[in-house]
Each structure stands twice: as C-alpha cells, then as structure tokens.
C-alpha cells in the first residue's frame, strides 16, 4: 500500500497554517508550540530544528522524544473522522495534533486542551 501523501510532506510546510489558524482567533504561536511540545516531547530548540530541516511528518513523529501518553484521551472529529477510531498510528498522531490546534482556535483554555488540571 502506498504511503499517504501527508507522511512525506514537510512539517514546516503545514506549521504556518497552524499558526495562522490560531492567530485568526487571537491565539499565539507560543501556544501552538506548547501544544506541539506537549504532544511530542520536543524542546523548543528541537522543534525549531525540525522546522529548519523541513523534516517530513513521518520522521517528525518517529523521532519525537516522548509522545505524551495522555494523547490517547484526545477525542472528537477532525476531517469528518473520529480521531480515537483512526487505525493507522501515524495518521492518528497527525490528527491528534490537528485536533489540538482546532481546540486552540475554538478558544478552549490551554489546561483543557493539554488535558491537565487547572492551577489552584
């Protein structure tokens, strides 16, 4: 079976769209980066290095230092498909990220997006 086209796309070609989507709703690049770091375990420097190298999605997720175990709690529909029902592991990781960015653009609080308790 042929690889899905998005797997070979560079992450850096999609990243500006994440930023634009967030900024249209008065959210920030920093919040987008925080979501990506939370999901993948990359540091900010590592994230920026992947953007600079134009790493493809397959490599970006394969080299992620520590995929967040709480990502399996991400639920909902993205592109008409429930993320929790996606069987292809890499596609599910990509859609998890898409779903988190969507939640940000919808105005959700970061602690809800990142599935963490609100500070006391």
Image (tube, rainbow, N blue to C red):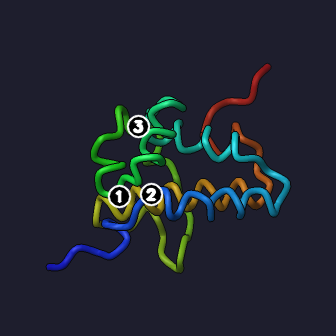
Q: Is residue 23 above or below residue 28?
A: below
Q: Which badge, 3 or 2, comes first in the chain's sequence? A: 2
User: Image quarter for residue 99?
Assistant: bottom right
Of discs 1 and 3, which sits in the foreground?
1
3D distance between C-alphas at marks 1 and 3: 22 Å
- Identity of the residue furthest to the right in this view: 26
Label 3–label 2 contact, CB within 8 A: no
User: Image quarter for residue 26?
Assistant: bottom right
Q: Nearer the viewer, residue 99 or 31?
A: 31
Question: Residue 48 at what x, y percent from top left?
Answer: 51, 39
Identify the residue at image location x=80%, y=55%.
Answer: 107
Q: Is residue 91 above or below residue 3?
A: above
Label 2–label 1 contact, CB within 8 A: yes
Label 2's element? Answer: helix
Q: Quadrant of the C terminus?
A: top right
- Identity of the residue furthest to the front in this view: 52
Identify the residue at image location x=52%, y=52%.
Answer: 74
- Give the labeled residue for mark 1: 56
Identify the residue at image location x=64%, y=47%.
Answer: 32
- Give the labeled residue for mark 3: 69
User: Image quarter for residue 114?
Assistant: top right
Q: Within 10 Å of the Cα at label 2, are there few (<14), some (14-19), or many (20+) other Cα atoms?
A: many
Label of residue 26 in the image: none
- Give the labeled residue for mark 2: 11
Q: Within 10 Å of the Cα at label 1, are there few (<14), some (14-19), or many (20+) other Cα atoms?
A: some
Question: Residue 35 at what x, y percent from top left?
Answer: 59, 43
Q: Which badge, 2 or 1, comes first in the chain's sequence? A: 2
3D distance between C-alphas at marks 2 and 1: 5 Å
3D distance between C-alphas at marks 3 and 2: 22 Å
């Amino acid at each position: 079976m042929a690889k899905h086209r998005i797997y070979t796309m560079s992450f850096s070609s999609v990243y500006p769209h994440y930023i634009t989507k967030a900024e249209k709703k008065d959210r920030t690049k920093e919040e987008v980066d925080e979501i990506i770091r939370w999901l993948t375990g990359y540091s900010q420097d590592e994230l920026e290095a992947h953007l600079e190298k134009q790493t493809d999605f397959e490599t970006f997720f394969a080299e992620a230092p520590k995929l967040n175990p709480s990502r399996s709690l991400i639920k909902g529909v993205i592109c008409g498909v429930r993320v929790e029902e996606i069987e292809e592991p890499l596609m599910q990781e990509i859609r998890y990220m898409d779903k988190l960015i969507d939640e940000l653009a919808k105005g959700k609080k970061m602690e809800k997006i990142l599935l963490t308790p609100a500070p006391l």
